[in-house]
Amino acid sequence: MHVAGRIEDYALIGDMQTAALVCRDGTVDWLCLPRFDSPAVFAGLLGTEEHGFWRLGPVNGPGGRPAPADRRRYRGDSLVLESEWDTPRGTVRVIDFMPPRDGAPQLIRIVEGVSGRVPMRSELRMRFSYGWVVPWVHKIDDRTVAVAGPDSVWLDTEAETYGKDLTTFSDFTVSPGERIAFTISWEPSHKQPPAVADPEGSLEATEEFWREWVEHCTYHGPYRDAVVRSLITLKALTYAPTGGIVAAPTTSLPECLGGVRNWDYRFTWLRDAAITLSSLLRTGYREEARAWREWLLRAVAGDPENLQIMYGIAGERELGENELTWLPGYENSRPVRVGNGAAGQLQLDVYGEVTEALHLAHMTGLARNDYASLLQLKLIQWVEKHWDEPDEGIWEVRGPRRHFVHSKVMTWVAVDRTVKL
């Protein structure tokens, strides 16, 4: 029985609209399609292998499962992940990535033989709606498609596949220099199939995208490699179509193992996004700040008196919280939640974070936006009337409101930055 790996053993890949988590043993245990906040098609991270996963690696571990990779790294300054296994029969490499989207979202996995002849296995178990729904899996021409309700996921590979135990398998062997690709693509189930993937072309385009993005980084101080890697991760958490920024690509990873503070972070907290933008602005990335400012203006709309602490990645306000009772949770940490009831909380500090972000954007050369300035003034008029009230604070306590020093300090920041405006 597959169980989720340690949190620190997962690597992030993504296309700036959703993200996948790849464990050290080559298992994708988390992927929501087509957006960060969509239901997961692989939810093994929060349950068992019955809730969906995609395992790809050499057949050399207990029970035929792959052992942890011997080496793993991102390819240069990119979000392309390489994992290598040394086996008794040779060395093999798996390249995992999600190309920046131009059409259907895709997760591409390329197996490359390095030395010897290595037996490999792909084990793909798709479970829609966070592991709740078993899809109808069938062949159309040379393609495998899994369909459930509004969703369809298409598997393209030159390797032979077969079905067993409601899972799609592929057993094959790779020799030095040989490359065999697997791609899954999502499409609404009522539409025409997505275009067949071009894995090698997509790999080249993905590396080029990240290389060009990193070239705009203006930071050249200590630990630059670590800073650039952090910036790439922050960029991966932006939702490209709208400029919204998710706090995390996951839900319900516990604050402490076995605890109940397991929240859904696939939304845009004004606080988290403002701090993210601060990092991006200070390292030369103005376009992300401009996109987020536009997102903010659309989300707040003409209603600044009812500013929420968080919104959906397209600016949605209704983020109703529900529990997924069929999932046991990471390390049995229940409940598993989707949505977030904290959207209705009062957290006075967000006014300071938002005005600080707008101020920093102005100070780093982002063109002035008159409506953004008007919004800032309206927010301060509200703060003037309510700054001395108790709130839930940065810790999002779910109990009686209290007075928090941090909240009061950040309302001062809001006023100070607006005076400077």
Image (cartoon, grey):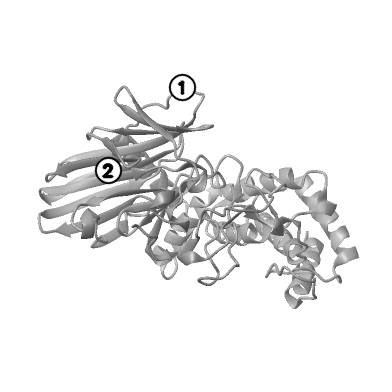
Tag 1: amino acid: Gln
Quadrant where the C terminus is found in the figure: bottom right
Location of residue 272 (image quadrant): bottom right
Q: Is the C-beta separation of discs 1 and 2 under 8 Å?
A: no
Location of residue 173 (image quadrant): top left
Quadrant where the N terminus is found in the figure: bottom left
Say the numbered circle drawn on residue 395.
none
Would residue 260 appear left or right of 125 to someone viewing this image? right
Q: Circle 2 sits in a helix, a strand or a loop, which is it?
A: strand
Would residue 317 appear left or right of 104 to someone viewing this image? right
Say the numbered circle drawn on residue 192.
1
Residue 256 horizontal/vertical position (percent): 53, 72
Judge depth for marks 1 and 2 and give the one in front: 1
Tag 2: amino acid: Ile
Identify the residue at image location x=50%, y=23%.
191
Q: Earlier in the sequence, mark 1 or mark 2?
A: 2
Q: Circle 1 sits in a helix, a strand or a loop, which is it?
A: loop
Residue 414 horizontal/vertical position (percent): 77, 64
Can you see residue 140?
yes
Front residue (pair 191, 65): 65
Front residue (pair 208, 11): 11
Front residue (pair 31, 370): 31
Residue identified by numbered label 2: 110
Residue 77 horizontal/vertical position (percent): 37, 54
Q: State how many labels appear.
A: 2
167 in relation to 416, above or below: above
Identify the residue at image location x=59%, y=67%.
260
Can you see residue 215?
no
